[in-house]
Amino acid sequence: MNNEYSTLLSGRYLEEKVFPYSLAEILSHHNINSYFDAASQTSKVLRLLDNCLEWGCFPEIAPLENTDIKSNLLKSYFDSIIMKDCISRYQIGDVATFKKLLLYSVSNAGSVCSYKSLGKATGTNENTTKKYISILNDSHIVADVSNFAFTIKENVRNSHKLYVVDTGLTNAVSYRFWNNKAKLLENFVFNELQKKKCEEITFANNNGECDFVVKNKFEYEAIQVISFTASLFSRF
């Protein structure tokens, strides 16, 4: 979609990604606008964070109380994005394989994978998998994140993690056989980093010392999910 606009407008455009609400915006909606507000209402803040992990941060979803309505809305968003932004726009012929890959990716968000392993798990080949993941990435349904390396050579950055644009979508359509709260929190932190418009986000799992590595210009910052989550409440 970005390529379509750039071709039509030929340099006369500014790209701006619009994300679901951030945690700060969710808290502000509930009159929590400072660190002191958050510290004095810890139980409420934790309840709101838990709600974000379960139902996501779409503006239409956040204020709703009825769980059935929220679930149905999220599923309709998901189906609409698949049909309009992916299958129709990119004229995908093998719809069944595309959906299978998407559901598998969403259900395993935050897990280390490769295009080869994804293809094997969903009954397709590596090239088709790479093509479909690229489409999903361009459509902003999932983010395809490479492992950290000081070089961009593909042979040292062949591990990937896929993160979903909103944790509510993950819960609405994924296969859930276990309590995946830790992976949801990791996905949520990744989305918060994206909303901060970091230049590049990679993951680091080689030595267990950090979860993400964020690059801004020539500086790198190591991010731990738990530490970053705690710091969110002091960044008002």
Image: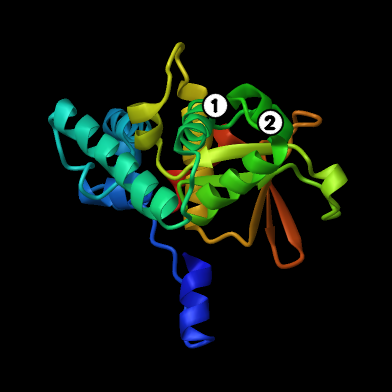
10 Å neighbourhood of mark 1: few (<14), some, or many (≥20)?
many
Which element is circle 2 on?
loop
Q: Depth check: 16 or 36 in front?
A: 16
Residue visible at 53% across and 32% down in the picture: 101
Give percent across and percent down for residue 61.
22, 42
Q: Amino acid at mark 2?
A: Cys
Circle 2 residue: 113
In the picture provided, is 126 more to the left or to the right than 207? left
Q: How many marks?
A: 2
Which corner quadrant holds the C terminus?
bottom left
Question: Would residue 223 be visible to someone looking at this image?
Answer: no
Disc 1: which residue: 108
Q: Is residue 216 left or right of residue 43?
A: right
Query: Which mark is on residue 71?
Result: none
Instruction: Report the residue at 62% width, 48% height from top.
Output: 131
Residue 109: image x %, image y %? 54, 31
Residue name at image x 74 percent, y 55 percent: 220
Residue 198 is drawn in which quadrant?
Answer: bottom right
Report the front residue among 30 and 163: 163
